[in-house]
Image: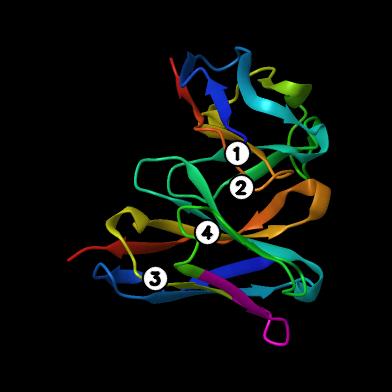
Amino acid sequence: EIVLTQSPGTLSLSPGERATLSCRASQSVSSSSLTWYQQKPGQAPRLLIYGASSKATGIPDRFSGSGSGTDFTLTISRLEPEDFAVYYCQQFGTSPYSFGQGTKLEIK
Amino acid sequence: QVQLVESGGGVVQPGRSLRLSCAASGFTFSGYGMHWVRQAPGKGLEWVAVIAFDGSIKDYADSVKGRFTISRDNSKDTHWLQMSNLRAEDTAVYYCARYSGGYGFDYWGQGILVAVSS
């Protein structure tokens, strides 16, 4: 089973700042099967990034993904108020299709 | 537009059964694999089960294997999660999600609450 570990658990930043979220896998993950989701309270997750670095439809340019192998990163270049949420990485290349435990991005 | 609507949730006693439904619209249902993902109160996301586009392949998380069964009827644009021998730790919001190959889980339902309690 591939375990995804996200860090930090909570990230406190102000609007306009840059956010860097990490996702580390216990074994190598194909970049084509690494995704990032955003979840706001009371809502379903929303696909942000697929293939480790491609933005899903309608996702603003301030979101970007990078990485390969066991280390992946989600970057939000300049935080907007609506970006404060919980972010999850997921791999769907190997069953079970695991999620990271999430990073909560909160307003400082 | 793509829509996924879950139903069938509720409060159930430990050891009992429940069947969740996920009705799809706005896309060719028979062309997509479908997943169930759950989220316990205040916790993260946990993948539960998947069924291939034609129903030929099914897979489950170890935590539900032998108790949950996923199925689909492409003529009804619907798939189901039959949950048996429910435990308190199965309490969660259950989401159905569409699997779009390299795009991952691109559409999700709004979620349905299952509470297992005596």
**Between marks 1 and 4, how big is the CA–CA gap?**
22 Å
Can you tell which of label 1 and label 3 is closer to the viewer? 1
Say which residue appears at 55% left-offset and 17% top-offset: A15
Q: Is residue B72 magenta?
A: yes
In the image, the segment drawn in magenta is: B69-79
Residue with the mark numbered 4: B95
**Between marks 1 and 2, how big is the CA–CA gap?**
6 Å
The answer for which chain carries disc 3 is B
Which label belongs to residue B24? none
Identify residue type, mark 2: Pro
**Between marks 1 and 3, how big is the CA–CA gap?**
29 Å
Residue with the mark numbered 2: A96
**Between marks 3 and 2, how big is the CA–CA gap?**
24 Å
Q: Residues within 10 Å of mark 3 (few under 14, many from 20)?
A: some
Of helix, strand and loop, which one carries label 4? strand
Please provide percent x and percent y for residue B49: 58, 60
Residue A46 horizontal side relative to residue B41, left or right: right
Please provide percent x and percent y for residue A42: 43, 49
Direction left: furthest residue: B118
Identify residue type, mark 3: Gly
Residue with the mark numbered 3: B9
Mark 1 vs 2: CB contact within 8 A: yes
